[in-house]
Image (spheres, helix red, strand yellow):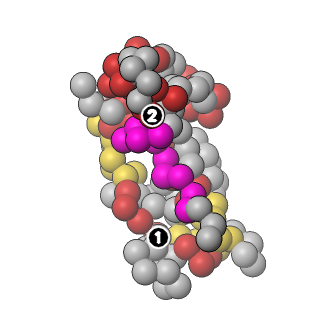
Amino acid sequence: MEHPCLTCGACCTQYRVAFHWMETDEFTEGGVPQALTQPLDPHRLCMRGTHSAPVRCVALDCEIGKYSRCTIHPNRPSVCREVDASWEHGKYSAQCAKARALHGLPELTPADWPWFTASNDGDGNPDDNGSDNNPSSPPSPPIAA
């Protein structure tokens, strides 16, 4: 079973993608490609295509509900990294549900994440809490020295 986001892309057609200008490749190695952004205010840029309706991120390659991919996934902005699909990390996402509903897609359920459910098998390993050592989990912040 593939990740549900690979057949969705709805969030990339519903929300403005705004982030600090220092996240671009002009200032940060491996950053967001500057050419795909536009100014929003003195401190923020946004991805082209997300500033006004109809919203569709310039980096999105998809047919909603069939296939979806971010063409700059390894270099996507922090705000995109923070978006979770419903139940991806064991909790509901109103943002995901709203975007999917606007495209006529059903809400995701815990059953859409069988590998997550299977890892939480109660064996006492860190994967049982839904965050530690779970390959789908966002990275933990570094521990301060």
98 vs 115, left or right, is right
Q: Is residue 135 above or below residue 41?
A: above
Tell me the residue at 49%/80% (across/down).
Answer: 28
Q: Is residue 36 left or right of residue 52?
A: left
Amino acid type, callout 2: Pro
Return the x and y of residue 64 as percentages of the image width and height. 38, 34
Q: Image height check: is 83 above or below 73? A: above
Of the image marks 2 and 1, the number of the one nearer the N terminus = 1
Name the residue carrying label 2. Answer: 126
Question: Which quadrant of the rendered structure holds the N terminus?
Answer: top left
Q: Count all numbered tags in the image, as a single digit.
A: 2
Picture quarter with the C terminus: bottom right
Q: Amino acid at mark 1?
A: Val
Q: Residues within 10 Å of mark 1 (few under 14, many from 20)?
A: many
In x, y percent, where is residue 113?
Answer: 38, 23
Q: Nearer the viewer, residue 89 or 73?
A: 89
- Give the x, y percent position of residue 82: 56, 49
**Magenta region, residue range:** 132-142
* Picture residue at 45% right of the left edge, 61% below the top: 76
Predominant SS of the magenta segment: loop
Residue under label 1: 32
Q: Residues within 10 Å of mark 2 (few under 14, many from 20)?
A: some
Instruction: Specify whether residue 30 is painted magenta.
Output: no
